[in-house]
Amino acid sequence: MNDAEAIKMFGKGLLGIVIIFVVLSLIFGSWYSVGEGEVGVKFSKYGNEKGFSPNELSQGWGFKMPFRDRIITMPFRTQEIAFFGNAEARNTYSKIIPKDKNGINFDVDMTVRYQIDPSQASEFVEQKGAGLVAMEQLLATAARADSTRGVFGKYAQEDVPEERIKIALEIKDVLQQRINQEATGKLKPNFIIIEAVDVRNIAFNPKIEAAIIEKQTQKQVAERKEYELEQAIKDKEIAIVNANKTKEAKILVAQGEAEAVLVLATAKAEGIQKVNNAYQDMPLEYVQVKYAEAIKPTDKVYFGFDSLGGNTMGFLNYNDVAGLYSQGQMSTSN
């Protein structure tokens, strides 16, 4: 084989490699994939659809024109950006150093949780940039704005621990307002949603820290006294309730005893009344006979002493007297 033939063979082989490369590029470059928790943004370099497509691409596989279309993926799950001062940690920026209402600086560790509105991902990429980097830069700038620092500026340092939750909610609101100010052009408000703000570690001025400790101590003492007062009031109320229960129990016992006496007295009265009624219903003759039978023969009646003569009268047998009356042997003149 001469040199000409060798060059010709080499040219054919190179052409074949180029053709294979083009075919593979067409095959693999025609497909894209959008992962879970992501939304796709299509950008066309030329043609009738040049520029960013307003329609976001959902999760899954899809077809695109090779060499023309580019697919940019944007995560829409909750993200977190931190202001810790540790540059080595991912998504971490330097601490925020605000001033309190007295003009004294202090350090704050803060985290912000956020997410992008997936329906505005295309507009965001077109105007602000692609990926987490673009979102973090926007949030880092907003978090360091005067509006955020102004929230801390409304409080004295010694009040920050107690008002931590309130301060975090206020910062969340001003951050959202600050982000919405970037909603120009095709972007609409809430293209990034601030979900929560956490105010974490706070490094106070040493003198202020002593004042905070004293204030917290006084607060704990006051809370303890308030607790003791509430407990004393509860104990007193319990004692009153128990006393009332005891009093009510005694009243119930007395009422029960009185009712028992009344029942007994009523029964006795009814019994006496029934006996009396029975005697009233008996014949007179029967009563006289029973009365006479009840008197024993030995019973005597003492008529007393003779006051003038000093002599006593003899004993009279009452049975004899009754017999004389019944036989008519004694007269009223005697």
Image (tube, grey):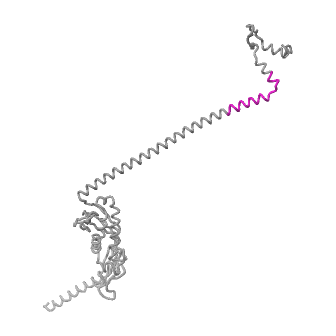
Q: Is residue 122 visible?
A: no
Q: Residue 310 appears at what percent x and percent y?
A: 73, 7
Examine the structure image and report whether residue 275 is included in the region drawn in magenta: yes
Q: What residue is at 56 percent from the left and 38 percent from the top?
A: 251
Q: Is residue 212 above or below residue 130?
A: above
x, y percentage for residue 5? 16, 91
Q: Which image quadrant for residue 103?
A: bottom left
Give the extent of the magenta segment. 266-288
In this view of the protein, which residue sits in the foreground, 214 or 28? Answer: 214
Q: Quadrant of the N terminus?
A: bottom left
Q: Quadrant of the C terminus?
A: top right
Residue 72's quadrant in the figure? bottom left
Residue sticking out furthest to the bottom: 4
Q: Main secondary structure of the magenta part?
A: helix
Residue found farthest to the right:
328
Q: Position of residue 50 (x, y in %)?
A: 32, 86
